């Protein structure tokens, strides 16, 4: 088959028949538009349409995802602690990632569903451990929980490891619960007021600059946060309890992902 015939066969994919939101966002955009190109009506409409289709795809994946979620939950190693956490507002993980829409979003590669990478949870917890638990008036706390390079405290080393040794804890990806998929992806907007200044085309911002709304998708719903401990190390249950307390506090007080200063990313444990 020639290149031309392949393009003809794949030239008009049916986005409304796709149940993978990530595939839609990455491959189905018909017309690329710059954030500053507000006059390109066709391209702006294409952006809005692909966001609409992605929301529908997320909801349509629920039946398959429910099976995958159950299998994943059963596969989590022991000893572990897991609990459902609900976004108090919205969260957006991967916002700054490279993407054709200029606003990224972290989705499961296979199912196209929202998730919080375990690396993001570990990084958040480690920073919170160093700056909050370690940075107190009590010098003993610094000695235990400091994460400063070359000065890692005993507890910090056990939980998170060092350059030379792995930590006791495994921070698993947090999967969104199947019941949240129906309304998991929600419309959102960023409105830069000085785009010419930010792009270097203007020397300084002025009061005459026009705000430019940029639509994107953020996430709402409940996630299962899970940690597991290396059972070959001493007192895994004690360390597991300490680590889960740390993660709970950091998610509630700091939040994960982008725009946390605007209230995004906060998650709290579901009651019961």
Image (cartoon, grey):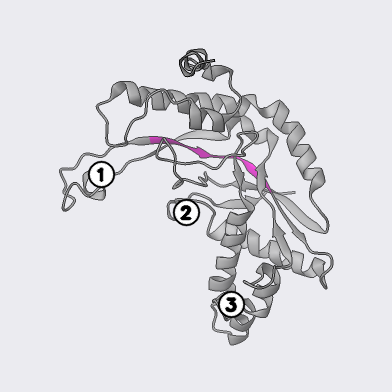
Horizontal and vertical percent position of residue 78 = 83, 56
- State whether residue 103 is above or below residue 21: below
Magenta span: chief secondary structure: strand
- State whether residue 163 is above or below residue 92: below
In the image, which residues are magenta? 215-224
Query: How far apart are the two marked residues, 2 and 1, measured between alpha carbons?
Result: 22 Å
- In the rendered image, which quarter is residue 108 located in? top right
- Residue sitting at 56 percent across and 40 percent down? 220
- Residue sitting at 32 percent across and 21 percent down? 42
Query: How far apart are the two marked residues, 3 and 2, measured between alpha carbons?
Result: 23 Å
Residue of label 1:
195
- State whether residue 74 is above or below residue 149: above
Mark 2 secondary-structure assignment: helix
Q: Are marks 3 and 2 in contact (CB under 8 Å)?
A: no
In the rendered picture of this protein, how many numbered marks are placed on residues?
Answer: 3
Mark 3 closeness class: few <14, some 14–19, many ≥20 residues within 10 Å: many
Residue of label 3:
146
Q: Which mark is residue 87?
A: none
Residue of label 2:
260
Horizontal and vertical percent position of residue 179 = 68, 34
The label nearer to you, 3 versus 2, is: 3
Q: Are marks 2 and 1 in contact (CB under 8 Å)?
A: no
Question: Given the current orientation, which residue lies at the most extreme front position?
Answer: 2
Mark 1 closeness class: few <14, some 14–19, many ≥20 residues within 10 Å: some
Mark 3 secondary-structure assignment: loop
């Amino acid at each position: 088959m020639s290149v031309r015939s392949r393009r003809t066969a794949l030239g008009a994919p049916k986005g409304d028949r796709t149940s993978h939101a990530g595939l839609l966002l990455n491959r189905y955009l018909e017309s690329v538009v710059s954030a500053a190109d507000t006059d390109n009506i066709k391209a702006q409409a294409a952006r809005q349409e692909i966001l609409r289709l992605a929301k529908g795809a997320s909801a349509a994946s629920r039946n398959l995802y429910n099976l995958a979620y159950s299998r994943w939950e059963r596969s989590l190693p022991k000893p572990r602690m897991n609990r459902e956490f609900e976004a108090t507002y919205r969260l957006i993980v991967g916002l700054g990632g490279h993407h054709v829409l200029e606003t990224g979003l972290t989705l499961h590669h296979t199912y196209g569903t929202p998730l919080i990478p375990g690396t993001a949870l570990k990084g958040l917890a480690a920073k919170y451990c160093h700056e909050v638990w370690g940075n107190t008036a009590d010098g003993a706390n610094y000695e235990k929980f400091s994460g400063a390079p070359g000065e890692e405290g005993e507890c910090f080393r056990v939980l998170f490891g060092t350059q030379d040794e792995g930590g006791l804890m495994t921070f698993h990806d947090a999967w969104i619960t199947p019941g949240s998929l129906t309304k998991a992806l929600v419309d959102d907007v960023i409105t830069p007021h000085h785009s010419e200044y930010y792009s270097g085309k203007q020397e300084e911002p002025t009061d005459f600059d026009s705000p430019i709304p940029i639509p994107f998708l953020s996430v709402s719903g409940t996630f299962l946060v899970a940690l597991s401990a290396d059972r070959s190390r001493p007192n895994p249950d004690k360390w597991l309890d300490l680590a889960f307390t740390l993660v709970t506090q950091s998610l509630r007080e700091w939040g994960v992902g982008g725009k946390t200063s605007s209230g995004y990313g906060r998650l709290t444990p579901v009651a019961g």
